[in-house]
Amino acid sequence: MDKSNFCSDLFLENVIKINHGKEKISSLFSKSQKVVQPRTKSSHHANLVTAAEGQEDLYGTVTDQRNLPMSMRYRKYTDHPSKVWVGPSKIHCQGLFAIEPYSQGDIVIEYVGEIIGNEEADRREIYYEKSGMSDCYLFRLSSDEIIDATYKGNAARFLNHSCDANCKAKIEVISGQKHILIFANRDISKGEELTY
């Protein structure tokens, strides 16, 4: 079979998974062969590839990112992380604020840090209290895994809790790994404090 003319749905799915819709795939073929591109305007997969890049699809419309599979949305977020800043909060000490507006369902930020077990989390919580730390940045990932963002985390640890939260935390499994993603509960304006 001539691989340069192979254009099945299975192949295009692999192009999307491996390629993230950005560059030619050298792992599927030798460097001398070309990657097959979608040939018809009715190709759903071509629309997914362009939507993942935030471009117009084959029909000239921009596809809503929230309709994409979670793995593609996550890749889009990691390629272009959200713009947030940490500043004084009316709720508690420091807070996280939006530099750009968000639509309901958008990924705002990922809660990252060191993954530890229950016993280590208990030990650290006691240590942090004895050290005089006023805040503890432990977030449960599963029944036996906790993310400690105290020293190895990102700005997500400054999200404050609110009864009228504009964000929600959700654990998503992407490529076999659990991630704590913070999503917009509603449309969020530039400058608004982010809460969950």
Image (cartoon, rainbow, N blue to C red):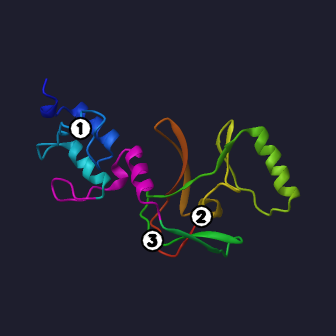
Residue picked out by circle 2: 195
Residue picked out by circle 3: 100
* Magenta stretch in the rendered image: 55-82
For label 1, the SS is loop
For label 2, the SS is loop
Which residue appears farthest toward the top when viewing the image? Answer: 1
Instruction: Where is residue 125? Give x, y as percent.
Output: 80, 50
Residue picked out by circle 1: 31
Q: Earlier in the sequence, mark 1 or mark 3?
A: 1
Q: Is residue 82 left or right of residue 21?
A: right
Instruction: Where is residue 93? Give x, y as percent.
Output: 71, 72
Of circles 1 and 3, the one toward us is 1
Residue kind at label 2, given as amino acid type: Thr
Residue beneath the point at 47% across and 74% down: 190
Q: Residues within 10 Å of mark 1 (few under 14, many from 20)?
A: few
Residue beneath the point at 66% across and 47% down: 114
Q: Earlier in the sequence, mark 2 or mark 3?
A: 3
Of circles 2 and 3, the one toward us is 3
